[in-house]
Image (cartoon, helix red, strand yellow):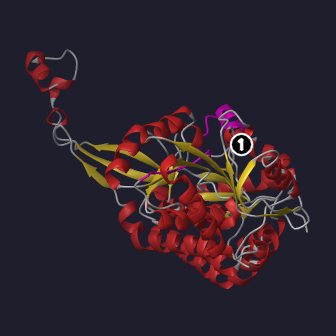
Amino acid sequence: MAVENSSQEYITSVVRRQRDYFATGATLPIESRLSALKRLDKALQEWEEPLTKALWQDLHKSYEEAYMTEISIVRAEIRNHVRHLRSWARDERVATPLKMFPSKSRIHREPLGCTLIIAPWNYPVQLLLNPLVGAISAGCTACLKPSPYVPTVSNVLEQMIDQTFEDNYVAIVQGNRTVNTQLLAERFDLIFFTGSPSLGRLVMSEAARTLTPVVLELGGKSPCIVDSSANIKVAARRIAWGKCINAGQTCIAPDYLIVHQAIKDEFVEALREAFRSLTGRRAEKSRHYARVVNERAFDRLVGYLDGAEILVGGNSDRETRYIEPTVIAQHDMNAPIMQEEIFGPIFPLLTVQTTDEAVQIVRRGEKPLALYYFGDEHTAERVLEQTSSGGACINDTIMHIANEDLPFGGVGHSGMGSYHGRASFECFSHRRSVVTTPTGIDLKFRYMPYRLFSLVKKLL
């Protein structure tokens, strides 16, 4: 199965009709937004089985993992918005200084307008529909572009969206990078992109032509520090889980390990046992262990293992796109595996003698999307103070994405802007400053020729 490229004519038509629809004001009433959110939630319930079957077909995701990491996250996001939208959308009163008497000030949130959401293949349901929740909540229209690398999922999503919304409100556009180029040539009021830093640069460059704001959810090499004070068994289990989800094809997966030399051997053995407890002794037989998305990604990942010192795992099968959870000893910081996001179930492991050495390794790289630290909480706070990342977990991995009240996003090389919960509503909104001044009082000192200026000067 493959997705069929949407035509240029359809793309242009959709953008024009969404602009016309937004101009009618139909997306503005809170009741309309709540109704649309509830329709999306109902659609997710009705299409749960086709979506989870499609995720199995394209990525070998089990029903449990598909529901936990895709559908449940979107449904929790919808519930959060339905519960709080009225208060989020309410005008926010702010203080007005005496010099502006008798004016009053407030912040009014208005939708940005016609938006474009481009999603990647690794979490094709969550990363397409979670931003859509924010767009609907804020009162925007949305043009959705799923990934062609998961064609079964993308086709099911198209059917679901087509049956849930009119395309002048929410529409799906399908296709390869040619279609991306055609979409980016259109004028939108916001582009929300999730993907690689290299494609993020392209999106930002295209958006600059029309001064279109962008939200970039990218990735990077998220470090995982295991200090000498760590609970080794718990750390190994939580790190192995974070790397096994979607076979490591997660933007916030722990990318590489920095382990204190004093516990290295014990930790490697604990990690080996943790992988076995999650996937069984033969991970290729596990119903809960996903596959690499395609042969090109498989070849890139297996290439990292050429000549490597393998500490755990190492088996693979190109025909089924299976790669066993693998740990390799890493000594060369300039090796390709240490220069680019791995995005797969391979762990390079570095050893250090001190926590400060681990911090210096992190600081030498680009700012990552996530940082994970395992050890005592006092040292963890020091590590956080001395590093920067989009998000972080102390003695855990991945779980910061599960809290709808925490904004999710990158910093620097790993992205810009954030979403989830209220941050999603704000992401698709403009905070409009409004000053209201009554006409019953009109103080003359503000006008030329500025009489009583010596008094006015003291107020300024």
Q: Quadrant of residue 199?
A: top right
Q: Position of residue 416 (x, y in %)?
A: 54, 43
Above-or-below relation of 175 to 66: above
Q: Position of residue 191 (x, y in %)?
A: 63, 47
The number of numbered discs placed on residues in the rendered structure image is 1
Q: Amino acid at mark 1?
A: Ile
Q: Which residue position holds label 1?
A: 337
Residue 205 part of the magenta-drawn span: yes
Q: Nearer the viewer, residue 211 or 400?
A: 400
Q: Nearer the viewer, residue 395 or 150?
A: 395
Residue 140 part of the magenta-drawn span: no
Question: What residue lies at 58% left-to-right and 52% top-to-bottom?
Answer: 113
Q: Residues within 10 Å of mark 1 (few under 14, many from 20)?
A: many
Q: Quadrant of residue 75?
A: bottom right
Above-or-below relation of 339 to 153: above
- Find numbered disc 1 in the image and state the secondary structure of the residue it sits on: helix
Q: Position of residue 84 (x, y in %)?
A: 39, 69
Q: Is residue 168 visible?
A: no
Q: Position of residue 356 (x, y in %)?
A: 43, 37
Where is the C terminus found, in terms of image quarters? top left
Where is the N terminus found, in terms of image quarters? bottom right
Question: What residue lies at 68% left-to-right and 46% top-to-bottom?
Answer: 341
Stretch of the chain drawn in magenta: 200-228
Looking at the image, residue 107 sits to the left or right of residue 347; the answer is left
Looking at the image, residue 274 sits to the left or right of residue 232; the answer is right
Question: What residue lies at 46% left-to-right and 65% top-to-bottom?
Answer: 404
Q: Is residue 17 visible?
A: yes
